[in-house]
Image (spheres, helix red, strand yellow):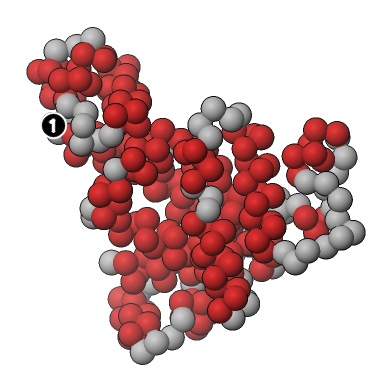
Amino acid sequence: MSPTPQRILAASRALFAARGYRATSMQAIADQVGITKAALYYHFASKDELLRHLTLPLLDELENALAEAESAGDPEAVRWCAIEGYIDVYLHHRETLLMLVRDMTLLVQAPVADRFRAAMALANDLVCGPDRSLEGRVRAAQVVAGLSDPVVLFMNVPPERLKLLILDGARALLTRSDPAREGTAEESARTGRHAEVTSRPPARGRPRGRSGGRPAALTGPEAEQARALYAAGRPVPEIADRLNVSRATVYRCLKN
């Protein structure tokens, strides 16, 4: 992409985050970039097109991070890879996330809404893990829902510090109180001490498909079978295991 479209996107992202998508005009964007409105329309036909260019990278990275987390191995590794990946993507796209939160109506528009719903459903599933109790599912939903708010509420906090604090909050929700555990991830980073193995999210896993991973897509008959099983009330993890595909693949099939 040439410099002018990049400047337009950067200006749009900042203005949408500061003023809101609905309240920002194409003229305001052109003025911010220092070009004419006609030149702006030459590069982007509408505000909707600008919105699409700003949100698709966030959604693409979020889906990739969750697919990578799913291949991490044991359920605990999957859980923390999903949480850490989610935070990383949100921190990387802070202004875009703020833009979406400022104008919640953007989150009900297709295809943004459909992809966000599918990503959140998969994240809830991965964070919950094999504990399908109501308590486990509620805690997983609380964790996933709470990953975005700190990112937009504390925009001035350095990303690495904020990430450690968000991870501490997620850990507090997902683990029982342990008097033997001392300190937090932030304290450990500040003092140079290593956190306990049980309190640290494991290293990110390798994405599926590079070697020996599950199939990335369903055949036509398999897709029909997946939809039929889901309609019959079967959970996504069971469908994925039965068809030998990832849960992300099943969610994409159901979304379409």
Q: Nearer the viewer, residue 166 or 74?
A: 166
Establish if 147 lies above or below 94: below
Q: Label 1: few (<14), some or many (≥20) within 10 Å?
A: few
Can residue 37 be seen at all in this image of the molecule?
Answer: yes
Give coordinates of residue 12: x percent, y percent: 29, 27
Specify the quadrant that holds the N terminus: top left
Give coordinates of residue 74: x percent, y percent: 69, 67
Q: Residue at x 49, y 42 (%)?
A: 90
Say left or right for 154 vs 182. Answer: left
Q: Nearer the viewer, residue 235 or 182?
A: 182
Q: Amino acid at mark 1?
A: Ala
Quadrant in the picture for residue 44: top left
Say left or right for 30 vs 135. Answer: left
Q: Residue at x 69, y 57 (%)?
A: 171
Establish if 38 lies above or below 231: above
Give coordinates of residue 186: x percent, y percent: 75, 39
Can residue 13 be seen at all in this image of the molecule?
Answer: no
Residue wearing tag 1: 45
Q: Residue at x 55, y 46 (%)?
A: 87
Give coordinates of residue 184: x percent, y percent: 78, 46
Say left or right for 21 vs 235. Answer: left
Specify the quadrant that holds the C terminus: bottom left
